[in-house]
Image (tube, grey):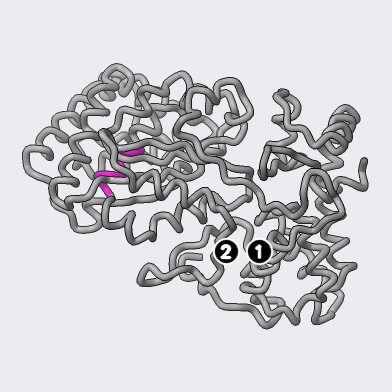
Amino acid sequence: MSNFEYLKAVEFDRAWLNFELDLPLKPAPGGKANPFYINRPGNPINELIDALLAPFYRPPKFFFSGHRGCGKSTELLHLLSNSDIQKKYWPINFSIREETDIIDLDFRDVLLAIGSRLFLEYRKQGGELPDQLLKELNGWQGKVEQQISTILKGRVSDYEIGASIAAFFVNAGLKMKLEPATRIELRQIVEKDITGLIAIINHIAAAIYKQEHRIPLILIDDMDKPDLDRARAIFHDHREIMLQPNCAIVYTVSSALFYSKEFDAIRDQALFLPNINLRTANDSMQHLQEGYRILEKFVTVRMDAKLIQPAALNQAITYSGGVFREQARIIRTAIGRARRRKITQIEVDDVEWAANEIRNEYRRILDKDDLKLLKIVHDSKRLEYSDRLRALLQVLALLEYRDEENWCDVHPVLRKML
C-alpha cells in the first residue's frame, strides 16, 4: 500500500480499505497532518517531543510502549514530521522486522541494524561521508569478512566477500533476517568486537552531524513484538550497551516489560501510550464523552457517517475498549457482514456479530482459570503484578487505562463470557 490514498469512503469497498488493521499513518506530503490522524487528549507523544527538544549532554534514549493496537507506529511517524524535531534532528524511522527475524531478536542484531540504517539512509538521501570514515568502514568490513571467511572455511556459502560497504550492510541484514546459521556466526563476530561496532555507529553519527548540523534521531519500530525473555535480554541485561550509540534513539518496547520487575532498568526514560478512556473505573455505565468523540472521529474521518447507524457506531465504540485497532477490526468485520447481507448501512446486528467473532477467538485461548482471574479484575479494576495478569494484558483480554491512577478491566466483548 505504498501508494495508499487517504480518501474518505462513501461506499463499503473503500471503507474496507480505510480500516486496514496494520497501516501506520504516514504524514501527508509537505509534512502536513494526515487526514486520518487522531490526536488523543494528553497525548504522551507530546511529552516525548518535549523531552527530545530539551537540552542534553548526551543524545537521549527513550523506551516507548503501549498495548498492541494503541497507535504506537502512527505516533512515531507523527513525531517524525514535527517541524521542531526536524530542525534539531536528522531523523530516520525503520521497523526492526525489516532488518532481522523479530522472533529471534538479539541486542547485536539491533546494533548492526542501527549502523546499517544510518549509513544506507544517509547515502540514499544524497549524503556524502568523508573519505577517512569510508576507509575506516572498509577496514572494519574487511575484519568482519575475514572472520566470516575463517568460520565458513570448508563450507559452501554464498556470503559475499569483498562487496562495497553499502552492499555489505544490505547483505548482512538479509542474512540476519533469513539465515539462522549465518545469523549466529555474525553475532559471534560482532560480540567479539562490540566496542568496534559501536565506534562505527558513533563515527557515522558524528559525520552526519558535522555535515547536516543536526543530530541523528533513530526511531525503531516493532521492537515490542519479541517475547518478554528477549525484551529482558536486550533492555535489561544489555541496557548499558543499548545506550552507547552517540545518537538519539527511541526504542519501542514490549508492554510486557512494563509489567515486569525488570522495568526498573528503563523507568526513567520510559513512556507508555495508554488506551482511550471511555468510562471511569468506578462507573461502568458512565460514558466519557471525550473518549467517545475521539473514537467516533476515528471512524467518521475514514468513512461517511451515513454508512453506519448511530446506535451501531456507539456500540462499536463501546466494544473497542478505547483501542484504535480493535475499533478498526470491529468496523471492518461489520462492513464485511453488511456487504454479505447486501445492505448499505452497518446496523447494530452487524456490530454484535463482529463482537461475537472476537469473543469466539478468545474462547479458543482462555481457560477456566483465566476467566476466574478476569472476573476478579472486572470486579476490582486493580492492576497488580502477576505473570498470568501480564499474559492477559498482552493478548488484550485485559486493557489498562490511566486517569488519576492506573486501573484495568476486561475487554468489553468478554463481559458476556463472565
Residue hosting label 1 = 294
Residue 352, horizontal then vertical, whole percent? 88, 61
> Percent from the top left, x then y, of residue 99?
41, 41
Membership of 115 in magenta stretch: yes
Q: Which residue is drawn at the image coordinates 81% and 46% (left, top)?
A: 361
Q: Residue at x 69, y 44 (%)?
A: 401
Q: Position of residue 212 (x, y in %)?
A: 17, 52
| Circle 2 SS class | loop
Q: Amino acid at mark 1?
A: Ile
* 11 within the magenta span: no
The residue closer to the viewer here, 81 or 354, is: 81
Residue 364 visible, this angle: yes
Picture disc at residue 5: none
The residue segment tinted magenta is 113-120
The residue that mark 2 highlights is 38
Q: Residue furthest left?
A: 132
C-alpha separation, residue under disc 1 versus residue under disc 2: 7 Å
- Considering depth in this image, is 83 or 414 the residue closer to the camera? 83
Reply above or below: 125 against 349: above
Task: Assess whether mark 2 and mark 1 are in contact (beta carbons under 8 angstroms).
Answer: yes
Three-letter code, disc 2: Ile
Residue 214 position (above or below residue 104): below
- Across and down, in percent, residue 233 comes to 49, 22
Q: Is residue 8 left or right of residue 287?
A: left
In the rendered image of this protein, does residue 227 appear above or below residue 351? Answer: above
Q: Main secondary structure of the magenta part?
A: helix
Residue 115 shows up from this direction: no
| Lower position in the chain sequence, tag 1 or tag 2 | 2
On screen, residue 336 versus residue 245, left or right, reads right
- Mark 2 is surrounded, within 10 Å at the Cα level, by few (under 14), some (14 to 19) or many (20 or more) other residues, namely some
**Image quarter of residue 294:** bottom right
- Badge 1, how many Cα within 10 Å: few under 14, some, many 20+? many
